Amino acid sequence: MANFEQSWSKPQSPGMADQIRGTIKKEGPLKPKVENAMRKMSQPIAKLDYMSNKLAEKDSKLFKRIVEARQRHDLGMARALANELVELRKNEKKVSGMRVALEQVQLRLTTVNEVGDVVASLQPALETMRVMGPALAKFMPEASAEFESMGSALGGMMSNTFEGSFDSDVGTSADTDAILSEASAVAGAQIGEKFPSVPTSIRSSLDESSAESY
């Protein structure tokens, strides 16, 4: 245990070369780097929370306007607003999915911080961050550069600490797919629980009106 604590909180030395294939370079402590990454990860999560709340407010207002348009028998307006709401909820699901995925990455960083299992825990998180980068840039351009920098820093921490190949590379893609699938499922469930769907009567009227127009 003493040897593990030294390798986790103190500069690395070549003493672990027999345990891991490759050569361990002399690097600074890993723990402060992981803790710094955890703090930075909180920023995009907070921004996604703010964005999600704003979208939720707009969702509620749009739905109310759809109901009011239906009460006025203004099917044209109701249809236009309903289409806008559909697109809005697609974005809500994407934002919620990204937030859940980032929370999964943050949990993996917590595992690294508490357990010190750098290779097994950090590699899937890095792959998730790589996949999430382009999507995050579309919603938060101002945060994408920092997010990319953080991923590069964590990746550099891995490559600068360990050289050689690791058996834990196997399954990284599957872990990433599992994280993103779970995020998508949770996001969809959250949207369904938070907001009502367009009433059946409105949908039926819209469909009938659309059919008559042809």
Image (tube, grey):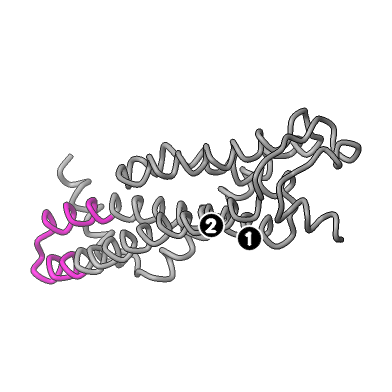
Horizontal arrangement in the rendering, residue 143 relative to residue 115 (left or right) = left
Q: In the picture, which quadrant includes the N terminus?
A: bottom right
- Magenta run includes residue 205: no
Horizontal arrangement in the rendering, residue 19 relative to residue 143 (left or right) = right
Q: Residues within 10 Å of mark 2 (few under 14, many from 20)?
A: some
Judge whether 11 appears above or below 108 on screen: above
Q: Residue at x 22, y 59 (%)?
A: 205
- Tell me if residue 12 can be seen: yes
Q: Secondary structure at mark 1?
A: helix
Q: Looking at the picture, how far across and down is residue 83, in whole percent? A: 24, 51
For the residues marked 2 and 1, what is the alpha-carbon distance in whole angstroms?
7 Å
Judge whether 79 appears above or below 171 on screen: below
Q: Looking at the picture, how far across and down is residue 164, in whole percent? A: 77, 28
Q: In the picture, which quadrant includes the C terminus?
A: top left
Is there CB contact under 8 Å for labels 2 and 1? yes
Q: Residue at x 22, y 55 (%)?
A: 206
| Amino acid type shown at disc 1 | Thr
Q: Residue at x 49, y 59 (%)?
A: 39
Magenta-highlighted residues:
64-85
Return the mark for residue 38.
Answer: 2
Name the residue that disc number 1 marks.
Answer: 110
- Magenta run includes residue 72: yes
Q: Quadrant of residue 169?
A: top right
